[in-house]
Image (cartoon, rainbow, N blue to C red):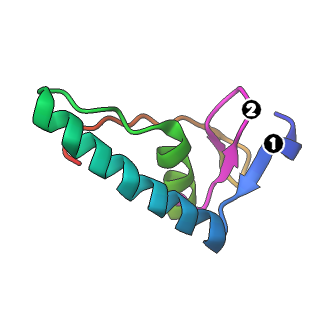
């Protein structure tokens, strides 16, 4: 994995991600009022949140969504259920 694509999620980036989350949540609530299934959470939201909470580096290239500090590849999965 090329390290130039690994991003540490800092405070400004997590604030932008949280703003995007609440915009997605509003859209998801609207969609669920029309149909029974909501919109899956975009990876551009779930991956940075997971990386921030778990102290991982976000991989914006192929080969894993994140990388642990000891070099392990990490994959995230997210849905709209329960949100």
Q: Is residue 62 magenta?
A: yes
Residue designated by label 1: 5
Q: Is residue 78 left or right of residue 36?
A: right
For the residue labelled by badge 2, is the local secondary structure a helix, a strand or a loop? loop
Depth check, front residue: 23 or 82: 23
Residue under the image location 36 percent in, 58 percent down = 22
**Compared with residue 34, is residue 16 higher up or lower down, i.e. above or below?**
below
Q: Residue 61: which disc?
A: 2
Q: Position of residue 3 (x, y in %)?
A: 85, 44
Residue 60 image point, x, y percent? 71, 39
| Residue 57 percent coordinates (x, y) | 68, 52
The kind of secondary structure the magenta stretch mainly shows is: loop
Residue at image position (55%, 42%) is 44
> In the rendered image, is residue 81 in sight?
no
Residue 29 in view here: yes
User: Would residue 26 be found to the left or right of residue 46 on screen?
Assistant: left
Region of the chain picked out in magenta, as a range: 54-66
Does dot 1 land on a helix, a strand or a loop?
helix
């Amino acid at each position: 994995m090329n390290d130039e694509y690994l991003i540490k999620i800092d405070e400004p980036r997590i604030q932008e991600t949280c703003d995007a989350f609440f915009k997605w949540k509003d859209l998801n609530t609207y969609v669920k009022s029309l149909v029974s299934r909501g919109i899956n959470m975009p990876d551009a939201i779930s991956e940075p949140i997971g990386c921030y909470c778990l102290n991982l580096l976000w991989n914006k290239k192929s080969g894993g969504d994140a990388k642990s500090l000891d070099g392990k590849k990490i994959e995230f999965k997210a849905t709209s259920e329960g949100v």
